[in-house]
Structure formats: structure tokens, C-alpha cells
Image: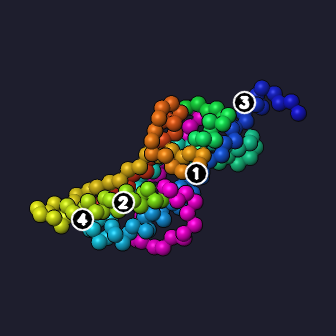
Amino acid sequence: MVRSYAEEKARILELPGMSVDNIMVSVKAALMETQQVMETSGIKIKRIDITLKSIASGETGTQIKLNIPILGELKLGSRISEKSIQTTILSLKPPKPTKVAKDIKFPQLGERLKESILSLTRGVMAAVNDDPPLEVYESSVELNFILTSESEISLIIKSGLEAELTNNLKIIFEKI
């Protein structure tokens, strides 16, 4: 079948990637694993700000999905422009701690976030407990990351398209 120029232009790129809900599962798992440590240090999560760069994918006439692009697979032949990139911004406030299923879709993100939160809580505990004690007003953890084709996150940003596809996760903590 021969497609017309208009049909070809209307077709949305089919790009592999990770859905926003898979990233949220990883974030929630990391937060639940660190909740008890945070409480003993005297801080709690005030707000979670997530900025994700995504690309619409699907065929004309089908449901459109927003996926977080995976860079290695993008470089294998897909071409996108800065204008094709969608930005999804989520600002969330966590409820009381609950248990989360361990079906983590993207464990490296959860592990990096968990390590960052634990490092921050150790710093807060040192500030509060060591002489002279300091009162914590507000603190935050921020991760800038891209997804790679090896199903890993990369925290090192080079240039060009990779910089355009940088995702950001910031957690703001406050005193209990």
C-alpha cells in the first residue's frame, strides 16, 4: 500500500520507552522503604515534583501513549525534534505511609532515590544531634536522569538531544 505524503506526516512515531506509571511505581517503592528512617530523623516529605520529558507514540487512529524515551533505542534510527517532546509535570503530596507492592519496573531509579533520601536523613540527624544543634527548616533531594537502552538511569548528561530529554525528580522535605 502506498501512503500519501499527508498520511505519512500524520503518522506518530512508534518509540519504545517507559510509561509514567512505571516510573511512579519505582518512586513510591523508594519512598515507602525510607519512610521509617525519615520519621526517626524528624523530617517528612512535604512535596514531590516530577518533570518528565515524553514523546507521543502510536499509530493514526489508535490510542496515543506518552512514553519516556529510552536514549539508546532512539539513537538506533528514530529521529525526533525538540518540538516532538512533551513535558509532564506532577506535583504530589504523599499520604500516610502504606506498604507498596515490590513489583518495581525500574529498580535503578528507586535505588538511587533511596540512597539520596538516606544520605539526606543522615545529614539531618547530624545537624540536629551534634553540637551545636541546628534546626531543619526545609531540605530537598533532586535527581536529574535519562533512561538508557540498558534499562538503567543515567545521571550524566552530555549534550544535544540527551539534554532535551532530561527528567527531573525533586522531593522537598519539612520538619515534622
Q: Provide residue 46's location: percent of width, then percent of height.
A: 34, 60
Residue 9's tag is 3
Most foreground residue, 156 or 21: 156
In the rendered structure, which amino acid carries the disc numbered 4? Met
Q: Quadrant of residue 104?
A: bottom right
Task: Find disc 4 in the rendering and name its residue.
Answer: 125
Distance of label 2 from label 3 (alpha carbons): 45 Å
Most foreground residue, 8 or 140: 140
Task: Find disc 1 in the rendering and name its residue.
Answer: 151
Graded by Cα atoms within 10 Å as few (under 14), some (14 to 19) or many (20 or more), the crowding at tag 1 reads some
Q: Is residue 173 visible?
A: no
Task: Find disc 2 in the rendering and name its residue.
Answer: 117
Q: Provide residue 77's location: percent of width, then percent of height.
A: 67, 34
- Residue 95 lies left or right of residue 76; in this view the side is left
Earlier-in-chain disc, 1 versus 3 = 3
Distance of label 2 from label 4 (alpha carbons): 12 Å
In the rendered structure, which amino acid carries the disc numbered 1? Ser
Looking at the rendered image, the disc whose residue lies closer to the viewer, 1 or 3, is 1
Earlier-in-chain disc, 2 versus 3 = 3
In the rendered structure, which amino acid carries the disc numbered 3? Lys
Looking at the rendered image, the disc whose residue lies closer to the viewer, 4 or 1, is 1
Distance of label 4 from label 3 (alpha carbons): 57 Å
Looking at the rendered image, the disc whose residue lies closer to the viewer, 2 or 1, is 1
In the rendered structure, which amino acid carries the disc numbered 2? Ile
